Amino acid sequence: MSEDGFRIRRLCLIGVGLIGGSLSLALKQAGVVGHVVGHARNEDSLRKGIQRGLLDSYALDPADAVRGCDLVVVATPLGAIRPVFAAIAPHLSDGCVITDVGSAKATVVADARAELGAHFPRFVAGHPIAGTENSGVEAGFAELFRERKVILTPVAETDASAEARVSAMWRAAGAEVERMSVVHHDRVLAATSHLPHMLAFALVSHLSKMSDQDEIFEYAAGGFRDFTRIASSDPVMWRDVCLANGEALLELIEGFQHELQEVAEAIRQRDADALFEHFRSAKQTRDQLKHL
Amino acid sequence: MSEDGFRIRRLCLIGVGLIGGSLSLALKQAGVVGHVVGHARNEDSLRKGIQRGLLDSYALDPADAVRGCDLVVVATPLGAIRPVFAAIAPHLSDGCVITDVGSAKATVVADARAELGAHFPRFVAGHPIAGTENSGVEAGFAELFRERKVILTPVAETDASAEARVSAMWRAAGAEVERMSVVHHDRVLAATSHLPHMLAFALVSHLSKMSDQDEIFEYAAGGFRDFTRIASSDPVMWRDVCLANGEALLELIEGFQHELQEVAEAIRQRDADALFEHFRSAKQTRDQLKHL
């Protein structure tokens, strides 16, 4: 039990990838969870989840998985969340609290509203701002959320005690919990996460089409390595982020293209002052983020 | 003295920033250099160079700095190289070998051809594929070049023994030396270094103009941190790279913008298959570079 008396009797984890797996390991390490039952489409992942100690049992039918649980964490890619909600809604216990970990919140809240019926007030949308470029049941580790932020985006109907439970869960996992409106969350994340991922994927993709690509990658140094690491992220997750947060992302891509076009124009004009000022100002901004 | 008998009697280092400073420290650690004399525009940097042990002496006049040296390394930003060549050419000793460390080679070779006169055959253009986002005399460290590649781009007139000396110098500093044509070097580096830097600078610049920029940066996570670290690089260096390698860079920016536009179009059309395939293919390419 944690200091503030928070405890999960029976946790249902739907999806046992990097985020779900790490959360379970963190909660077990914190000693705040009794039994963890897993569900995923791939039974092999569930077996590995047991071997790695992040699950105590598993169920192939989501209805069986959620039965008798007091907390359900849906940690699948965004595109799988609505069918999961539809499958579990009729089988949720009274008072059960439901949350998710998706990187975009508007679609998830809409999916929950459409599918969870009377349970909707106990659904608390959440997003841990943490991750690595690795994915799958082997990728999780208990320390992933330590000192990282988790953003909750409750809506008008959201039950305060449900939000308090989800908040306590993340604090037990080592995270710092904040709240934000759904729209604001989706805009902030499009800027700091979704757009950078698009740029990294597009850069690798563009270079891979060049005639001398083998050699090009051979001479890539540290900056390139850091810059493109996130292009190793899960393609299903990123497809779903694009579909879920397309509007905010398109606006940012357009703004970025405009910025890059101005740089290209300065290069074409050999405008040394404009180039210097562009780099100086960006460096100044980035230097202020050294704590990152 | 190194195993193959390589030794620099008196090295002149023009520019004492990250690359020049690290090279001097590496050569001293390897025990292959007698005396290192520095020159830079900022005397304070030269004093710090002596304090940090990367210089044995310094000269405020480049003519004095090169006098009696058997090797001169020009480690200034690209835009300062031509005036340096002009200033030192009349004062170089017979047989002195000259090299540089610039990130683009066509302009440097043209500058050397224009200014070095009879010394041009002993100029060997070079580029260590190594660096950090830090700059200045405090940033250097002896291990920077270990197991990193250095590309030399000799031309038809280049003296083979001069090339052999520059190659031996970099091997003594721990690097692996390769050769490439000037044009090919500039294209490869535009792809793997210059374009990624443009994207990182442009991303930080674009986000810093958003109305909620403070909060945006507050929620930036690990991926963003790695992705934008290179936007802390020296603005003078990058201004000069843009001016020196503009043609190759513009071609790459254009290609990248086209690639990003295709992604934007797939998001707009909600084309799940095209998005998945784009991310899957980029991830596959990047995963093959895990050794980076």
Image (cartoon, coloured by chain):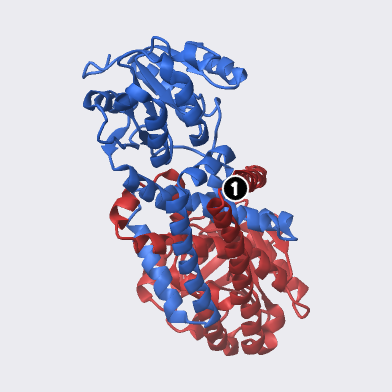
Chain colours: A blue, B red
Q: x and y percent of residue A155 in the render?
A: 28, 36
State the residue at coordinates (51%, 55%): B142
| Mark 1 surroundings within 10 Å by alpha-carbon count, few (fewer than 14), some (14 through 19), many (20 or more) | some
- The chain containing the residue under callout 1 comes to B
Give the percent coordinates (x, y) of residue A73.
41, 24
Task: Please determine whether, in this image, residue A227 is positioned above or below residue A50.
Answer: below
Residue appearing at x 40%, y 63% in the figure: B206
Q: Residue at x 58, y 52 (%)?
A: B266
Q: SS for tag 1?
A: loop
Image quarter where the N terminus of chain B lies is: bottom right
Q: How many marks?
A: 1
**Is residue B31 among the parts visible in the rendering?**
no
Q: Which residue sits at x=63%, y=63%?
A: B191
Residue A222 vertical placement versus B159 (above, below): above
Residue placed under numbered mark 1 in the picture: B271
Q: Is residue B141 visible?
A: yes
Point out residue A75 in the picture as x, y percentages from the top left corner.
Answer: 46, 28
Nearest the viewer among B258 and A168 is B258
- Quick check: A55 left or right of B125? left
Vertical order, A191 against A152 (above or below): below
Q: Amino acid at mark 1?
A: Asp
Residue B108 screen position, x and y as percent: 62, 78
Q: Nearer the viewer, residue A66 or A89?
A: A89
Q: Quadrant of residue A276?
A: bottom left
Whether residue A58 sits left or right of residue A100 in the image: it is right
